Image (cartoon, rainbow, N blue to C red):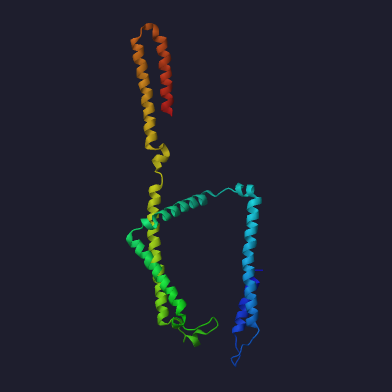
Amino acid sequence: MLIFPTCLTGALLYMASLKDASGNPEFSWAGTVSTITASVTALVQFGSMIVAAYYLEQTADKRVDDVAAIVDDAEVKKADDEAAHLNKCYREVTQWNKIPVLPKLFMRSSLACIVISCYIVQLFSSQCFTEHSLTDSIDDNLQGNVGNLFLPLGWIATGLFSASVLLLYVFTSWGKVKAKLKAKEAAPKPEILAYGSSDDRTDFDLDLQAAADGIHADELVVSSNDNNSVASYHRRHSHSQGAHSTSTRF
């Protein structure tokens, strides 16, 4: 359904380009039929995407539990999460109001080059390239040199396009480096993952100190009482030791 109309259109286009010894089309009907088959091919390609989207949506709606039950691959999920975090950092560091002057210059220059190149090709195409079709011979039409396809203005347009691609590559490379640095800075440190934040450790130390102070307070109270309060001291001291032991284990 997908391949046959495409191949048929290509074959008819080729047949329409063939000419006999007198210069007339060898298959005069092929041009008209190729136009029809090209339209059919476009409809088939577009319709296949619509059908695929419909069945994907139906499956996602009717088999939600089955889809949710599929276990994510741990390594793939980790890689996806890291990539999503890196993309988020890239978007943040490439905000236009945060970009330094030099990367902005690269981006503006890239935009200017590609716009000028496109206008040259669109408005002066006959002055950019030698007329050449898919079925023409390179030996006959271009004297055996593919470079003859480009006229002087065509070389300028191609050079501007190449410069635009290069400048865009420099800008994106700069952004990726900055994004990686930002991602490393935003990542939690191993010691914090293991023991919590410094505030948590401070609270933990205060709990230990409070338990120790409670023990000393009990001992002072006992020392100020008479011998008849020994049993009460033992109960308080045991309770404080239990609290200190629990806090220490924690």
> Which corner quadrant holds the C terminus?
top left
Task: Tell me if residue 51 comes above or below residue 152 in the rendering.
Answer: above
Count of marks placed on residues: 0
- Residue 153's quadrant in the figure? bottom left
Decide which of 40, 112 is in the foreground and name it.
112
Please indicate, yes or no, whether residue 166 appears anywhere in the rendered image: no
Q: Is residue 163 left or right of residue 60?
A: left
Q: Is 116 situated above or below 67?
A: below
Residue 170 place in picture, x, y as percent: 38, 64
Q: Nearer the viewer, residue 215 or 178?
A: 178
Front-most of 99 and 142? 99
Image quadrant where residue 206 sits: top left
Query: Residue at image x 41%, y 23%?
Result: 244
Q: Is residue 234 left or right of residue 134?
A: left
Percent of width and height locating residue 23: 59, 91
- Looking at the figure, which quarter contains the N terminus? bottom right
Give the left or right position of residue 219, taking residue 147 as reference. Answer: left
**Going 47% across and 76% down the picture, which residue do you hit?**
122
Q: Position of residue 74 (x, y in %)?
A: 52, 48
Is residue 85 visible in the rendered image? The answer is yes
Q: Is residue 187 above or below residue 159?
A: above
Residue sitting at x 36%, y 26%: 209
Among all residues in the image, which is located at the extreme bottom? Answer: 22
* Residue at 39 percent of width and 49 percent of height: 184
